[in-house]
Image: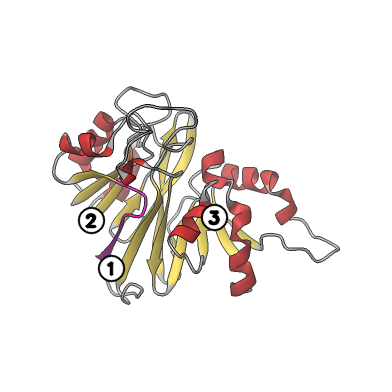
Amino acid sequence: MGPGENQLRVLVLGSGTSVGVPTIGCHCAVCTSADPRDNRLRPSIVFQYGGRAVLVDTTPDFRQQALRHGLSRVDAILYTHSHADHILGLDDIRPYNFRQKDPIPIFASDPTMDAIQSVFRYAFIEHTVKTHIPKLAPVRLSGEPFDLFGRLVTPVRLLHGQNEIYGYRIGPVAYLTDHSEIPEESYALLEGLEVLFLDALRHKPHPTHSTVERSLRHVERLKPRRALFTHIAHDLGHARTEELLPDNVRLAYDGMEFTVDLPPAP
C-alpha cells in the first residue's frame, strides 16, 4: 500500500560510499560484519507521494536496488551531481519506459546534465533504427524551487569539495549527500525539517565529504526532529557508531523507510 494523499514516504535504496560496503578485497570488521546494516549499496533514495515515485540519482547498483525493493515505477529522477556512483545506473530505467510509455523527466544542474548527456550520448540523439534506449526528458535546473507532481521541490546548493552540487527538499524532508560544506545561504532552506539526511563519510577528515563530527554541528544548528547520516564508508560500524550519537541522530541503512505528513496540496 502506498502513502496516503498527504503523506510522503521515503525509501533508502543505498547508504554507502562510492565503492560500497563491503569494499572489494577488504576484510575489516565492517566489511565482514554479520549486521545487514553494514552492507551498503551506493547512495540513493526514493520520494513517494501522490502515487508517484521520484528517484534521487541512479547508482551503479540501481537495478539491484529496484529489484530488492520492488520499485514498480519511476516517474522522475533528481540528480545531485555527475559522479559515477550517482549516474551510472541510468540505462537501467529502460524497463520503466517499456511499461510507463512516456519519457521520464530527469532534473539536473547544467554541469550535471552536460555530463549525463555526454556519458549517455546514445540516449539523447535521434536514431534511424528503432532501439531500446532510455527515453528521457531532460530539465535543466536554475536553482529555483519547482513543482513536481503537485509538490514543491527545492534544490539546495552544496559544496562537494570545489564543485557545486544539489541536495533536495520535498515537504519536511531534505536529502543532502556528498557535501563537504553547506553554504550559508542554503541554511535558510533547511529550517523546520522533520528529517534531514546528511553526508557523514567517517570520522577522519576528507576533502570532499563531511565527517560525523561536522554533520553533528549541522544538526545542532538546523535542529531537525531527526537526522539520518548517509554516504557511509567502511570506517563506521553501524551499531557502534549509533551508540555514540545523540538520540535524534541515526545512521541510514539500505531498506530504511518512513512516512511523514505533508500539508494539503494546493
On residue 63, the disc is 3
Image quarter in which the N terminus is found = bottom left
Q: Alpha-carbon neighbours of circle 2 within 10 Å: few (<14), some, or many (≥20)?
A: some
Q: Nearer the viewer, residue 124 or 60?
A: 60
Which quarter of the figure has residue 6? bottom left
Which amino acid, by three-letter code, is at mark 3? Arg
* Magenta stretch in the rendered image: 252-261
**Is residue 182 at least partly visible in the picture?**
yes
On residue 194, the disc is 2
**Whole-number angstrom distance, CA of label 1 to CA of label 3:** 29 Å
Could you tell whether 152 is left or right of 107 in the image?
left
**Whole-number angstrom distance, CA of label 2 to CA of label 3:** 29 Å
Q: Which residue is mark 1?
A: 262
Image quarter in which the C terminus is found = bottom left
Could you tell whether 223 is left or right of 85 in the image?
left
Q: According to the image, what is the colour scheme of the structure?
A: secondary structure
Position in image of residue 255 (x %, y %): 35, 55
Which amino acid, by three-letter code, is at mark 1? Leu
**Image point 39% across, 66% down: which residue?**
48
- Within the magenta stretch, is there residue 163? no
Label 2 sits on a secondary structure element that is loop
Q: Earlier in the sequence, mark 2 or mark 1?
A: 2
Label 3 sits on a secondary structure element that is helix
Q: Earlier in the sequence, mark 2 or mark 3?
A: 3
Which amino acid, by three-letter code, is at mark 2? Glu
